[in-house]
Image (spheres, rainbow, N blue to C red):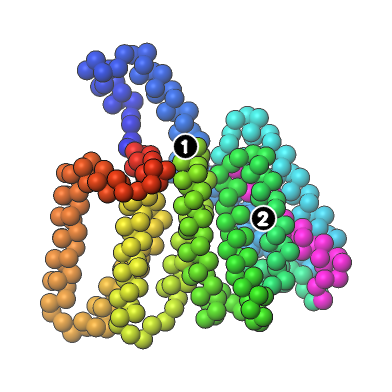
Amino acid sequence: MQITRGELADATARGLLSREQADGLWAFLVERQRETPGFKPAHILYYLGGLIAIGAMTLFMTLGWQRLGGAGLLGIALGYVAVAVALTEGLLRRRQSLPAGITAALAIALVPLAVYGAQHLLGYWSDDDPAQQYRAFHTRIDWRWLLMELATLAAGVVALWRWRLPFIVMPVAVTLWYMGMDLVPMLLGGDTAGFFSDEGKRISLAYGAALMVVALWVDVRSRATLDFAFWLYIVGVASFWGGLSAMDSDSELGKAVYAAINLLLIATGAALSRRVFAVFGGLGVAFYLGHLASTVFKDSLLFPVALTAIGLGFVAAGVLWQRHEAALGARLRAPLPAALRELVERRASH
């Protein structure tokens, strides 16, 4: 629900609010929205700058870094961490929690590089190309990354304890995904593999499902505070859906099950007011319909007609839902546990 100053003025004109109440409520809403992530120009600049900085020291390291050696990598990483921590503390003193969360995430994202530099300094890596190996941290499954991941998780826990900023969960969630991809092959005694191997797809699917459950638990626990579950949902759904979509199925039944799972994701997104479920679920349904149109019903004249009817049926269902939303929502929420029911009601009011 979006509230404008004009709507508060209308409420004042109708006698629903006094002028002082309207001014106080508007000041409260402006203060609350200032630190609520959204597509505001300042927020876009925050996230763009933060992602560029994080990517520069993680995904986009060049081969020239090999000349620094382990000591150089460790020193540079620790220097960047110190600057990021100082920026975070300074921004929080100025009550700028959103950019502070981004600089805190930058500090955590540099921990793997610091650990890798220390490992290389101690002779843990035999290859003479540390930058090339470090970039593989984001693309290859290898149990040797576990020390870097454990250190990153420890840094994330300390940062959350110190600062309580939701964006800190982003590098923690990504690291949890990496750890799941690396830990399972180690436990099973398998070789290193890429994310798109058969093993990688299965691990991604299972780990994404587990992370979605964790995200729901965090969501319920933090329902009355800041949104600490957002990035857990993002990474969990992306991991689950990516692994599911990358799997090959030669049977139409398997593809139909894939479509049903994506419909379930859409329903889950509607129930929890989490767009990430609906976005990925919608993509999956679109892929399945594309498969039907190009393969199963390639020469059919009735398929587009039937598909149009189905689409209009969903529109009609949406109209009926909007008319009876309060009653239907209350009826569907009634069997839920009290904590989960409160979460859904709070999310639905936004």
The residue drawn where x is 59% and y is 34% is 96
Q: Amino acid at mark 1?
A: Ala
Residue 219 lies, in percent from the top left, at 47, 47
Q: Quadrant of the N terminus?
A: top left
- Of the numbered discs 1 and 2, the one sitting upstream in the chain is 2
Q: Which secondary structure lies at badge 1?
A: loop
Residue 109 lies, in percent from the top left, at 66, 54
Residue 343 lies, in percent from the top left, at 40, 43
Q: Amino acid at mark 2?
A: Leu
Residue closer to the observer: 142 or 68:
142
Task: Inspect the magenta stretch and tell me whether residue 114 lies in it.
Answer: yes
Task: Inspect the magenta stretch and tell me whether residue 53 lies in it.
Answer: no
Q: Where on the picture, by quarter, is residue 334?
A: top left
The residue to which callout 2 is attached is 153
Residue closer to the observer: 37 or 191:
191
Distance from the alpha carbon under mark 1 to that under mark 2: 25 Å
Crowd rating for badge 2 (residues with CA inside 10 Å; few <14, some 14–19, many 20+): many
The residue to which callout 1 is attached is 224
Q: Which secondary structure lies at badge 2?
A: helix
Q: Is residue 310 above or below residue 335?
A: below
Compared across the picture, whether 2 is left or right of 67 comes to left
Q: Is residue 204 above or below residue 323?
A: below
Magenta stretch: dominant secondary structure: helix
Region rendered in magenta: 101-126
The residue drawn where x is 78% and y is 49% is 79
Crowd rating for badge 1 (residues with CA inside 10 Å; few <14, some 14–19, many 20+): few
Q: Is residue 312 above or below residue 203?
A: above
Residue 273 seen in render: no
